[in-house]
Amino acid sequence: MDTTRFERLLAPHHDAALAFARCLCRSRADGDDLFQIALVRALDHLDGLRDETAFKSWLYRIIVTSHHNSVRRSFWRRLVPFSDHEPPASADDAIDEALGGAQRAARALSTLPAAQREAIILFEIEGWTVEQIASVQSCSVSAVKSRLARGRERLRHVYLHRLGGEALAALPAPEGSV
Amino acid sequence: MSIDDTITHDLHAFGAAHGHPRAAAPEPALRGHQPATSSERTALAVQRSATRLRVERLGPTHARRMARAVTGVAAVIAMAGLYDFLTDPAVSIEPAFNILGVLVLLAIVYLITRAVSARRFRRRFVRARRDGLEETYAAKARERVERLDGWSTGLAVFGLSCVVPFLAALYVCEPGWSGDYPPIAEAVFGMHTLRTCALVSIVPALLLGSAVTGGRGERRAWLRYLESPLALAVALGLAVIAFGVAISAAERSTMETMSAAGKLGRAVLAQVAITSLAAWTALRLRRGELARIGLSPAGRAT
């Protein structure tokens, strides 16, 4: 395994990819686990990467695939409850006025299906184009647009009806917001 | 401020909280124990991934080696037990049922041992990761896999050497195959007594196991010869000669007139052929495993 080459390729994208993995998961620990699983898989298949300029999208595709696998696995995990298993976050919790913006977004994002969540995070937080997201998610551009629109609609619904959106919308705009 | 603005603002705050570089820098408290600079973080992440990958590659090899060793022992026990049972004249032999029974028993033993071993390996690694002992575990796992090398090769060869003639003997008892069950079956059973199997196979099997333990085997020329196609051809030739002579002797009804030394010589020849075939199979399996876990068959770690 060529760790030197992998390190050289990973270095410019490490922080962003780690942040992306953390955003996909419900907790930082899960995100770190997902990131490491993706790195192990990437290192294992590094020989198959012909075009080094495509490393970033290749790595993100691996993260997305690993995330899908973990979501699928957690379905089975739900059938067998463990005492130390983290309870899934729910947007049905009572409105918490003290919730920060990040926590509100985390709760709202946790209600989205995995594909919509990935598309929203890549588009809104990472600033990727629809075409780039389509290549990472291995789907068509129109499918990505549909996921973004549905995801945004779902977030709006969650904010309005479950997270006290009316009250939030009445707040003054925070500094630096768009 | 519209609800969409709030969502956008919250998503950016969410990105910043998870340390996204496009957003604001994460708070120091959120950084945890990570090193300060990005290059150090990358190097650490790559190092951890490489360690984990090494262990993950060792896992299936460890499970397969354990399963081969245990299945080898199970094959010897099954052969010993059933041999006594089937050679009892009072017992009516059901060849097809017994062949299937032995094969199913060995397959079950192999699959269960492999599954249990893989699970235990994974659980130990998870515990080691939790305690931050990944590197130590990787080194220990490698040692364990290398230690198992000899046992898995030796016991697998011995098990195969015992069970193959036994199954062959059962096979020729099939009325559809021989048409004339007693003389041929007697010939084959007569050749392959448990004592012959044990004496002829156990010594080379244990020698082979000892020779490959700890990766020493790669430097031995005779081992390289044993896993070459030439060795396979020689072993197949010996097997054809031994079984051909046995069957023709049985058909000509000369078994009774053959001397004890002649019978023993033929039995030893057949058993040598079978042991060579078993050794060739085990060594070829081992060669594939060494390539998978990062040890080239021609030398030490790559």
Image (tube, rainbow, N blue to C red):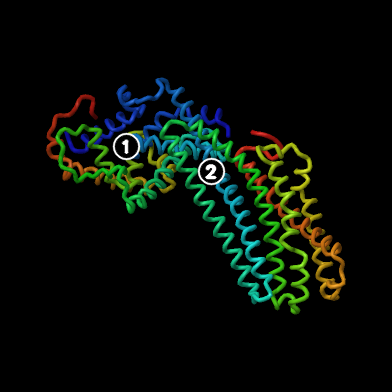
From the viewer's perspective, is B59 left or right of A94? right
Instruction: Judge if badges 1 and 2 mark residues of a common chain.
Output: no
> Residue A79: x and y, percent?
33, 54
Judge the density around disc 1: few (<14), some (14-19), many (≥20) Cα neighbours within 10 Å: some
Mark 1 or 2, closer to the camera: 2
**Quarter residue B14 falls in:** top left
Mark 1 residue element: loop
Q: Which residue is mark 2?
A: B59
> Residue A103: x and y, percent?
24, 35
Q: Looking at the image, which residue is at 87% across and 69% down? A: B258
Q: Chain of mark 1?
A: A
Q: Is residue A32 above or below residue B204?
A: above
Q: Which residue is mark 1?
A: A27
> Residue B94: x and y, percent?
63, 74
Amino acid at pointer 2: Gly
Amino acid at pointer 1: Ser
From the viewer's perspective, is B266 left or right of A89? right
Quarter placement of the N terminus of chain B:
top left
Q: Is residue B84 above or below residue B226?
A: below
